Image (spheres, rainbow, N blue to C red):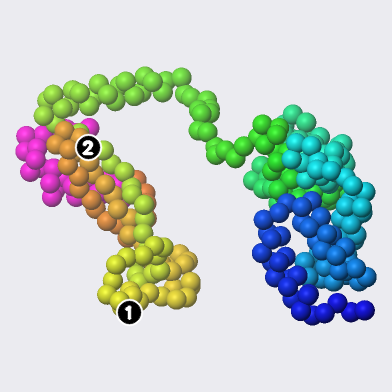
Amino acid sequence: MAIPEAILSQLRCRFAVLLPHLNERQRRLAVAAEARLLGHGGVRAAARAAGISETTVRRGVGELESGAGPLPGGRTRAAGGGRRRAETVAPGLVDALMALVEPDERGDPESPLRWTTKSLRHLAEELCRQGHRVSAPTVGRLLKQAGFSLQGNAKTLEGTQHPDRDAKFRYLNEQVKQHQAAGEPVISVDTKKREQIGRLPMAGREWRPKGDPVQVEDHHFFFSGPDVEQAIPYGIYDIARNTGWVNVGVDHDTATFAVESIRRWWKTRGQTDYPTATRGC
């Protein structure tokens, strides 16, 4: 005997309201209870109304008929239930993972994975290639359990230094003091970041009238190659007067252009600020 559509419609409405608030075991038992009330064909009808498998409903019916009580401690599964962790199924998984992330201590120096490619996805792919079925989230969980975390580089390695390095800077410092005491100019010269010249696309946004963006080139060959002009700012900083002066070149970043920048600074500014100067630093 077929179950009337009116009953099935009411059952779907009850499940839609109730089941989202129940845990796994409670949902299974609630659907199984309705299936028992429906009688013959109730398992299939209840499973379709709830959107779960008939096997799950039959399991719930079996639990109800066995008279099993609530699980202790608010558990939703019996002890030992559920999927076992990947490291339990594959005891060598953790060692294989550590060999990838610690090549200097335990890993293979010929490993195809290097420090720059050790994302969770790449690690999971390499472990799968070695025969370990593992996902990227599982790799992340195992790394955290092993004390790993995402970290940037720490700039702490100084490398070798020339034995006269400190003496050189002490000499320069004394020269600066002597020149400043005598009223002679002391300047610092450096080259700023070079910029390409032209209507070229740049990252970022700026405020403009609506519908009126700045028009720029759309093909990369307009702003690449050795023939593209560049603006190269040379900064002259007057240490004593705390003032700056900039000369923009359009050719090369060489010592010759730096010297020419100093010469232009002296002609346009330096000789005015230091009319009695006889030397500089």
| 12, 143: nearer the viewer | 12
Magenta stretch: includes residue 263: yes
Q: Is 278 situated left or right of 42 in this image?
A: left
Residue 217, position as x, y percentages in the image: 41, 75
- The quadrant where residue 153 appears: top right
**In terms of secondary structure, where does tag 1 sit?**
loop
- The quadrant where residue 69 appears: top right
Magenta stretch: includes residue 177: no
Which of pointers 1 and 2 lies earlier in the amino acid sequence?
A: 2
| 22, 66: nearer the viewer | 66
Q: Is residue 45 visible?
A: yes
Q: Residue at x 66, y 64 (%)?
A: 17
**In terms of secondary structure, where does tag 2 sit?**
strand
- The quadrant where residue 214 appears: bottom left
Quadrant placement of the C terminus: top left
| 33, 194: nearer the viewer | 33
Q: Is 183 situated left or right of 56 in this image?
A: left
Disc 1 target residue: 211
Q: Residue at x 17, y 38 (%)?
A: 242
Q: Residue at x 12, y 46 (%)?
A: 269
Disc 2 target residue: 187
Amino acid type, callout 1: Gly
Magenta range: 256-281
